[in-house]
Amino acid sequence: MDDLYRDYILEHYRHPHNFGVLEQPTASYEGANPLCGDRITMQLQVEDGIVTEVGFTGRGCAISQASASLLTDEIRGKPLTEVAEFGAADLLDLLGIEISPARLKCAMLSFDSLQHLLDDIGAKPLAKDAG
Amino acid sequence: MTTETRPVASPLDPVALRADFPILDQEVRGHPLVYLDSAATSQKPTSVLRAMDDYYRRDNANVHRGIYALSERATADYEGARVKVARLIGVSDPHTIVWTRNATESLNLIAYSWGRRHIGRGDVIVLTEMEHHSNLVPWQILAQEKDADLEFIPIDDDGVLRQDVFEVLLRLKPKLVSFTHVSNMLGTVNPVEEMTRRAHEAGALVSIDGAQAVPHMPVDIGAIGADFYSFSGHKAMGPTGSGVLWARRELLESMPPFLGGGDMIREVHLRRSEWNDIPWKFEAGTPDISAAIGLGAAADYLMALGMDRVRAHEQELVAYALDVLPREVPGIELYGPAADQRGGVVSFNLPGVHPHDVAQVLDRFGVAIRAGHHCTMPLHERLDLSATARASFGVYNTPADIDALAAALREVQALFGG
C-alpha cells in the first residue's frame, strides 16, 4: 500500500468534503502557499459559539485538498472553544500519513487559514510566527 | 575529460559524457537517478570540482593583496577565470565581466547602480510577461522608488512574445528594455538580436537575462549587441555562488558602485573615496574566489564540448520529448512553442493531478523534476495555471531519461486514475 497516497487521501482529493462557498459566512480567509502557488479560501459560519457551517474552495495538491477536507469535517458542528484547541499535531494525526518536510506546507495550508479565521472572529489570537 | 579527442563535427555522446558527472552514478529509491532539473541547477563535471578543490588545497589565499606565491596563484586563477568566461560568451574584454553570486544579483546590480542614476519619474521600462521573478522584482522596487512605469510585452498562446505589441511599446520611448533570452518555464528562445536592434532604434538600452541560454546554446554577446547581459554560473556547470554581469565598458565605467568596501576602492579617506577600475569597482569585499575559479573550469568544459553540439543535442531531446510524451502519456498537457523555437525545457500537467503530486510520485522512480510556479507567477497567471511540472535537460541527459519520465508518468496516472 502507498504510504502517502493512501486510498482515503485520494478519495478526499477527488471528492473533497465541505467544498463550496457559504451563503452567510461569519468570516472568510484566503490562504496561499507561495512556494507552489496553491490557494484556498476557507469560510466559517458561527452561531452561538458553534461552527454551524464550514466550506472551502481553491486549487491544490492531494495533500492540501485532503487536509482541508478532513479538517473541515473535524470542526463542523463543534464549539469554537474546542476548535481553538485543535492543534497542528492533531491535524497530522487526522491525516495519518508520514508528511515530509517539503510537503508540510501543503498539509498545513488549511490549518493556517483556520488560525487566521479564529483570529478574525476573536476566538483565538494568531500566534506571532504564523504567516 | 576526454573531449579533445572527439571529432568536432560529431554529435555529443551523452552516455560517454555522463562519466564526467559522478553524481549521476547513483540510485535513488532503488532506481537509477534520472536528473531532469537542469534549468534549476546543472550538475557539475569533475573538472569543475577539481579546480575548486585544487584552489583550496594548494592555492588558498586572498586575491589582489598578498605579496607571496599563494596569493599570486590565487589571483592569477581568479582573473584567468574571467578570461575563460569572456571567451565562452564572445566577449573580447575580460574586464567587462563582473563576478556576482547569480543572475539575480546581476540584475539587481543593474537596477541599483544604473537604474538609480538613470531612471526618473514617469520613465518607462519594458519587460515581458514571461520573466523570472529576478527580472521583475528589482524593476518593481526601482519603479516604486522613482515613480517610473513598467510595461510588459505579452505572449501569444504558443508562449511566443508578441513582437507587434513590442513595436507599440517602443513608441513610449522606454529608457530600458529587459527580457529573458530563453524562458525558464516555456523554453521559448526569444529573438534577442532583432529585439535588441529595435530597442536601440527606439533609443532604449537593452538588458538580457541569459540564465537559461548560456548553458545551452552558443551565446555571442558581441553579435547580440545588448548593453547588459546576466547569467548564473550554477546553471552552467559551475558552482552555486557564481554569477556574471557583463556590460559595455562605458556603462560600467560610468555606473556608481553597488556595494562599498575593500577591493572596490583606489583611495580611501575618512570622508570620501576613489573607486577602483572596472570590474573590481563592483566586487567589494573578499569575493567567492573558488566559485569564480570553478566557473572558469565550467566555461572550459562547455567550450571543449562545443556549444553548437550542446544546442543540437538538447534540441534533439526536446523534439523527442514533445513527440513521445503525448503518445506515451495520454491526456498530458504540454506548454510552450514547437521544438525548433525552444531550449531544453518541457513544462506540463497531468489533468486531475497536482504537479506537486506528480513530482512526488516521480521521485519514487528516481526521476527528479521541478513542480510549482518556477519563479514565474505572472506567467502562470497569464496561462491560467496555478502550477506546472517541468522537465529540463542538460548535456548529460539521454532519450532513455525521457522514456523513464514517460513510464513514471504512467505510474502517476495509474495511482490517481483508479
Image (cartoon, coloured by chain):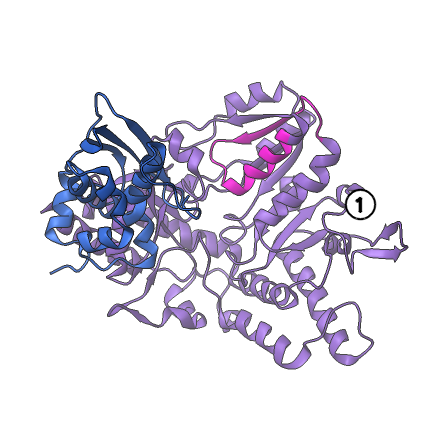
The chain displayed purple equals: B
Image height check: is B43 above or below B332?
below
**Looking at the picture, which amino acid does disc 1 mark?**
Glu
The answer to whether A32 appears left or right of B195 in the picture is left
Displayed quadrant of residue B207: top right
Q: Nearer the viewer, residue B84 or B128?
A: B128
Answer above or below: position of A16 versus B57. above
Is residue B62 toward the left or the right of residue B34 in the image? right
**Left or right: B63 in relation to A104:** right
Residue A10 in the image: x percent, y percent? 14, 47
Q: Farthest residue in the left direction? A: B418
Secondary element at tag 1:
helix
Q: Is B116 contained in the magenta span? A: no
- Label 1 belongs to which residue? B253
Residue B398 spot, x, y in % from top left: 34, 60
Q: Quadrant of residue B348?
A: top left
Q: Nearer the viewer, residue A51 or B276?
A: A51
Residue B322 visible at all: no
Q: Position of residue A9 (x, y in %)?
A: 15, 49
Residue visible at 73% across and 75% down in the picture? B73
Q: Nearer the viewer, residue B349 or B160?
A: B349
**Count the marks: how many?**
1
Quarter of the figure with residue B280 = bottom right
> B288 or B205: which is nearer to us?
B288
In this view of the protein, can residue B6 be seen by the observer?
yes
The image position of residue B360, as x and y in percent, is 27, 55
| Chain whose colour in the figure is blue | A
**Letter of the chain that mark 1 sits on in the rendering:** B
Residue at 44% in and 33% down: B378
Q: Residue at x 20, y 46 (%)?
A: B329
Magenta stretch encompasses residue B139: yes
| Residue interval drawn in magenta | B119-144
